[in-house]
Image (cartoon, rainbow, N blue to C red):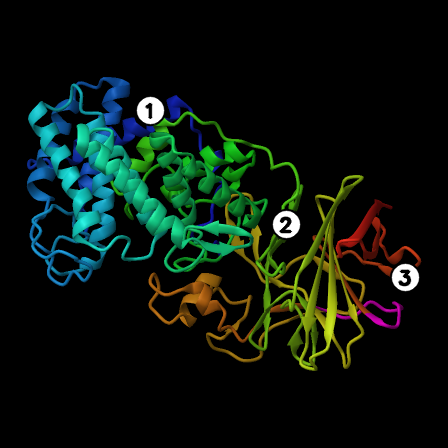
Amino acid sequence: MHLPHQRGPLHDLPDTPEAYDAVLADVTEQALARLTPEGGLEHPDCADDIGDTSLGITSLLALAWQRSGDPRLPAAVRRSVDFHLRERVYREDNPGYPNLRIRDSGLPYARYTLAPGAHPVGDWPSTVWALLQAVNVTEAAAGLLDDGPRHELLRVAHGYWRWLTEATFFNPQEAANQAIGCVVGGLMLARQLPGPDGESARARAMELYEREIRAHRVRDRGALLPPEHGGAYDNNYGPISLSFLAQAHRVSGEEVFAHDGDALARYLDARLANGGFDHGGPRYSEQHSGFESVLGLRYFGHRIGSDLGRYRGDTRWGRHAVKADGGVDGHFAWMLVWQIQDTTRWHRAPAQGTARHQLRSGTVSVAFDDRMTPSLIEAGGTYWLPAAVARQHGFGPVTDGFLLCRPMGEVRVRDVRAGGLTAKLVTKPVVGRDHVLRYVRSLYVTDGTLLWTTVTVERLDGTPYLLAGLPYAEDDGDRVRRTAHGEAASAGPLRLTHPRAEGPEHFDARAELTQEQAAFALAADPRGYGNPDEGWRHLVDSTALEAGPVPDTPEDLHVFAVRYGSSDPLTVTVTRDRSGLVVRTTAFTAVLGGDDAHGEPELAVHPA
């Protein structure tokens, strides 16, 4: 079963001027064939996200005319602008809209659906989108629109801005991508409004960004991030926010957008596997955006010097939004306009240097969560998620049903590169049910093809084992597909277990259900509105790789050793000498020394 959204890396899509001209030529032919007698350019099946879509196609036609001079386009642009002004601008309050601060303001807004009161909660983002489409059209209006229609559309755009920032509560869905998009609309509008109106719009946009977005950032994995639907980051919307930050910096030159975009980009780079797979988010776990992410990934990938384009987007939306039949839709058209206008090139090489929350080399990567527990392991073309046991999630030693991976104190990290090997040692204090403080030392070593994990902890009672992950997905070169198996070996006993119980709280990797579907089934609200990250935390148990202790180790320690990427036999010896704990494999020798003068653990790694 292929995962439905994580498909090809976005940097694989051609982005030459000729390629974009071909995209616009296709849009042109579809739009001219679709243009109604009234001037509408909406897809015939469009029912929601409709308030901005005709104007979005108009903006693409305006850009196509700028680049091609196609003589058929000026008349189509004029007719479609008239259609929007006549049929898609609403000034009477939508019945049931819950977020108004001023009743009967008479200010224009765009509707998410056209029927009064049908789904008014979506009117705020639809109006943001309509504002962005409008300013794109008015910027490209020279030679296309007479002064009258252009002035009227600009007046409506100014009204949209006022409705968004005066008549309603700002960012009522707590969605950073919508909020930053509104700020971008204000900044672009400010460049076109004369005198005091332009100055006021720019000042208000910057004020809103500082007070309503920056001031509410959420910390995760050492980064401050614009919150998305109440969480720190969402796989679908996070890269869209990055694109908005790129456009905000492009049009305003304000360094705050570059600074915040760099931080978000480095965070995304750390959590994203080499193969572009990622999961998790407060709105969607595995649904990925497509062309809407390209601007931000390309712009900030170039700035931070990393290959963010490896992100696996939804290639059904590789060029523009589409409906089920593949026909072009104007939703998000502004992002395609900006993507074409921006000439930044993809940065194709991984970032240099180390990152606390990432280990990455060749085709191997480990992303670490805020507690420095792996949130995703990639090796041998397989992606491993944290497994679950007794409602506890993660990678780590298990004793008497208790998972030792939640830190009780400062987590120490040491990174080493030597002889083609990349290594990370994570030392965390943990407390078990017996309230005894222990130190779990997890060593991750990769040669770029295989990943070795060695975990040591003070000797535990009973029959402990290492919870070593949930094999979840494979990379087939085209898309990511579900799996229930991964190549791995252990220096101790190894078993792959599956839940004995059935139901939504027990995730069996052999079933076709995706992680996102399972997470939504456990979320408090319906799919698309619930928090899948929160739902997934309710998981009781899952398919899990379980590794027993390595034999013949120092008698005061339990040691576990797993290699990901190959099922060939694994031999690991662990001894102690004056230099520290010595871990030997056929590929390397690692010495886990004592702490330095600052309490940081010492680590040395040498190729065998």
Question: In this rendering, is residue 165 above or below 525?
Answer: above
Query: As shown in the figure, which amino acid type bears the numbered disc 3?
Result: Thr
Left or right: where 415 falls relative to 125: right
* Front disc: 3 or 1: 3
Question: In this rendering, is residue 417 above or below 497?
Answer: above
Q: Which residue is mark 2?
A: 356
Q: Which residue is mark 1?
A: 21
Residue 18 at x, y percent in the picture: 38, 22
Q: CA distance from mark 3 to mark 1?
A: 64 Å
| 10 Å crowding of disc 3: few (<14), some (14-19), many (20+) | few
Left or right: where 422 falls relative to 178: right
Q: Secondary structure at mark 3?
A: strand
Residue 34 at x, y percent in the picture: 16, 36
- Magenta residues? 546-557
Question: In this rendering, is residue 349 above or below 93?
Answer: above
Corner quadrant of residue 545: bottom right
Q: Earlier in the sequence, mark 3 or mark 1?
A: 1
Left or right: where 67 falls relative to 225: left
**Residue depicted at 31% across the width and 44% down the height:** 207
Corner quadrant of residue 269: top right
Between 520 and 577, the one nearer to me in the picture: 577
Query: As shown in the figure, which amino acid type bears the numbered disc 1?
Result: Asp
Q: Earlier in the sequence, mark 2 or mark 1?
A: 1
Q: CA distance from mark 3 to mark 2?
A: 28 Å
Q: CA distance from mark 2 to mark 1?
A: 42 Å
**Residue depicted at 43% across the width and 64% down the height:** 532
